[in-house]
Structures are given as structure tokens and as C-alpha cells.
Image: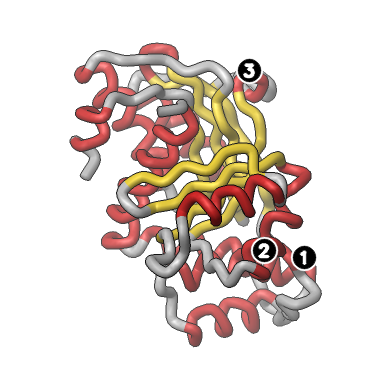
Amino acid sequence: MSGHSKWSTIKRKKGANDAKRGKIFTKLIKEISVAAKLGGPDPEANPRLRLAIQNAKGQNMPKDNIERAIKKATGADSADYHEVTYEGYAPHGVAVFVECTTDNLNRTVASVRAIFSKYGGALGTNGSVEYLFERKGVFTLQLPEDRDEDELTLELIDAGAEDVEVEDGVMTITCAMEDFGKMQKKMEELGLEPENAELMRIPTTTVSLSDEEFQKAMRCIEALEDDDDVQKVFHNIEAKDEQLQTLE
């Protein structure tokens, strides 16, 4: 299995845990707020907001929560959010790229630095690990029971998909960053509703870890993911199937 697919599996399992703790709703509302404030409240005219709403629905966020977030973001007293990224290393040389949305830059950088230090990692400078990742569009959805997998795969590849994988009934479609919008439209045409669609940073070089090393690195990554200002965390661990099982 390719490195980015392994990473998607880690993210999917971790995402389920986040949902139980209510963390994921906070991050989704923040993304909706930023999208609405930057591009307006109409999802038809605001692709980023449309995507944020789609992802929120994929996580079963109530419609009232979504509408309330949009209304608040476009009001006079809306929070002034900044989008910022940090780069560093988790234990055992694992490259980590962190995307944040915050209303307090000083708090966020202090928190991210403290997490790296606490768990045996180190915050780096801008550009220190970015070159180890490439941005790709990644869509995940449950494979429809009434659709032929091979036929659907061919249609998606014809539309520009670089990679289509199906595992445990979950289809993962990867495309070039510049083809993200086109792939989104194609999936709408095909009547497919992704559970999640986003631009990810896919590692071009991965690291393999022993079970003990994996647990130590993941403790650092999970602590970053749990921070309220952190939206996404990308890393370059090439996990074994047995290691993935420990995240469930």
C-alpha cells in the first residue's frame, strides 16, 4: 500500500476518535467560519465554503450548527482568524507539517512549540520539511453498493484521478492539486458524495518505525491534533497494518 494511503488510514481511524471527543466539530466550524468570512455566505458562489459544508455533513454535523457558524462568521462581531503553518520533527525523525487557524498567533506558536518539546520532537523553521510533501486533492467515500467498482474507477481516472484505491469498502481518490475543483465537479456529476474532501500534504519520502517508535511519534502527532488551534497535521510515517490497529 502506498505511503499516502497508509496516512489516510491513520487519519480515518484518528478522525473517528476525534469525533467522539467533539474535537472535530470545533475544527469544522472554524473552517466554515474562515471560508464564509473570506468568500461570503453563499456556498454556490464560494467553493471553499461549499467544501467545508460538505465535510461537515460528512461528519454528521447538524444543519443548524452549520447555518449558525456561517451567520456568526459574516456578522459584525465575528472572530478575526489567521491561517498559519508550522513545521518540525516528531521523535525518530518523523517530518510533521501543521496547519493552524487561530485568533491569537502568540498563543498558537507557543502551544505548538511546547507540544513538540514535551513529546521529544522539535519545532523547525519554515521550509524545513515542506519539501518532503506534495499537495494533492484527496476524496474519501463509501463505495456505493449499486456501482461497479472497476467502471467507476475508470470514469474517475478519465476525469483526472491519479490514484483510486478501495479498502474495506472505502474509496480513496487522489488527484493533482490543480485538478481538485474539476474532480469535485465530476463527483457531483456522478452522484457521489464524499465523506471527506480536502487538499492534503502527501509525503514523498516516508519513514518506517518500530512499534515502540511508532507509539512515541504518534503521541506527539495526536497531541498536536488535539490542540484547539490546529486544523490538520501531516506526517511521513509508513505504518504497518499491525501498528494501525493500535489506533482503533
Where disc 2 sits, the SS reads: helix
Query: Is the C-beta separation of discs 3 and 2 under 8 Å?
Result: no
Amino acid tagged 2? Val
Q: Quadrant of the C terminus?
A: top left
Amino acid tagged 3? Ser
Q: Badge 1, how many Cα within 10 Å: few under 14, some, many 20+?
A: some
- Label 2, label 1: how many angstroms apart (C-alpha)? 6 Å
Q: Is residue 229 left or right of residue 156?
A: left
* Marked residue nearer the N-terminal end (3 or 2): 2
Going 55% across and 67% down the picture, which residue do you hit?
192
Query: Residue 201 location in percent, x, y?
Result: 59, 35
Q: Is residue 104 visible?
A: no
Amino acid tagged 1? Leu
Query: Is the C-beta separation of discs 2 and 1 under 8 Å?
Result: yes
Where disc 1 sits, the SS reads: helix
Q: Is residue 218 left or right of residue 42?
A: left
Using the image, tell me which numbered label, if any, was put on residue 128.
Answer: 3
Using the image, tell me which numbered label, if any, was put on residue 38.
Answer: 1
Query: Residue 246 location in percent, x, y?
Result: 19, 36
Query: Residue 225 location in percent, x, y?
Result: 41, 44
Going 56% across and 63% down the picture, which residue do you hit?
30
Going 45% across and 51% down the picture, which residue do you hit?
171
Query: Residue 48 location in percent, x, y?
Result: 70, 63
Between residues 90 and 196, which one lies in front from this camera angle? 196
Using the image, tell me which numbered label, if any, was put on residue 34.
Answer: 2
90 relative to 104, above or below: above
